[in-house]
Image (cartoon, helix red, strand yellow):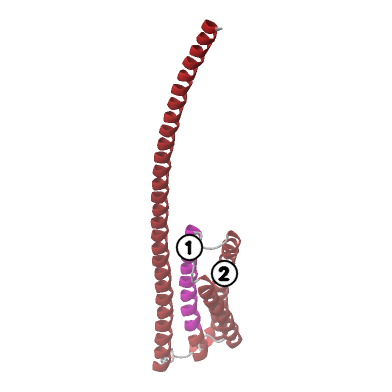
Amino acid sequence: MALVDHDSWDIEYEGCERLRHQLLVQLHQRQQLGQPKEKEYIQLTDSIKTGLEQLGKDVKHLKVVLDNAITWETSPQEELQQRRIDWDKLTSQLREINQKFTNSTRSNVLAAFSGSAWQEQVRPPAPRETPIDVETLKLRQAEMLEDQNRGLEALSATISRQRSLATQLGNEVEDQNNILDNLANAMDRVETGVHRETHSIGQVNRRDSTWGYWLVIIALFVAILVVVFV
């Protein structure tokens, strides 16, 4: 009985790809702004940081799904090999996005500092503005909760799949045990039949031997009579 795999690789991989594409778009938008002190720039920066953290978690969990599929051999080897290639590519792309984010942040900060360093020295510091308003904070919290819910749903699906695989494996072991029991019973019946037939053949051989003995005696007796009376 073959085990049927219903893993969540395709769904989670597509989710990682969507998030990766979204981060690239946000990086491009932030690069177009180029002013680290702008409110939109700060919001994009915070959103990219959150997205990078979530993508890192998703990629790690995707590795767990891949390892489970390899351990349980729930997919053909060609598909598992392709998944390894896709995961390696996704990991490399994540590193590139992190590096691009770090480099662009450093470049923008240096550019802003070099352009305003002199003015900052001769004028009094301006009052610090709140970088994130209440609505933005609520939006970020809602996004984080939604990401956490997606992660919990994926984890629940993985646990459910593993439980189903364990149940199917137990059923398969039970079926194999039943087959072995039936085979043992059949062997016992065959062995009993062989003994019975062997005993019957022995009796037939003994009866044939007895008849042969009497036939020899009768033949000798007839021969003696012929010699005597002829």
Give the residue drawn at x 39%, y 52%: 177
Q: Relative to 193, say whether 215 is above or below.
A: above
Identify the mark at residue 3; answer none if there is no mark.
1
Q: Relative to 68, say whether 28 is above or below.
A: below
In the picture, measured across the screen, residue 148 lies left or right of residue 27, that is left
Q: Secondary structure at mark 2?
A: helix
Q: Where residue 17 sits in the image (x, y, percent)?
A: 56, 76
Chain-order first, disc 1 or disc 2 = 1
**Amino acid at the residue labelled 2:** Leu
In the picture, measured across the screen, residue 128 lies left or right of residue 96, that is left
**How many residues crowd around disc 2 within 10 Å: few (fewer than 14), some, or many (20 or more)?**
some
The residue closer to the viewer here, 204 or 87, is 204
Residue 128 visible somewhere in the drawing: no
- Residue 90 image-quadrant placement: bottom right
Q: Is residue 51 magenta?
A: yes
In the picture, measured across the screen, residue 42 lies left or right of residue 100, that is left
Q: Where residue 211 sits in the image (x, y, percent)?
A: 46, 23
Task: Give how far apart the Cα atoms at labels 1 and 2 are.
Answer: 29 Å
Q: Secondary structure at mark 1?
A: loop
In the picture, measured across the screen, residue 33 lies left or right of residue 143, that is right
**Magenta highlight: main SS:** helix
Task: List the single residue furthest toward the front.
Answer: 229
Residue 199 visible somewhere in the drawing: yes
**Amino acid at the residue labelled 1:** Leu
Identify the mark at residue 90; answer none if there is no mark.
2
Q: Relative to 165, say whether 45 is above or below.
A: below
Q: Nearer the viewer, mark 1 or mark 2?
A: 1
Which range is magenta?
A: 45-72
Q: Where residue 74 sits in the image (x, y, percent)?
A: 51, 62
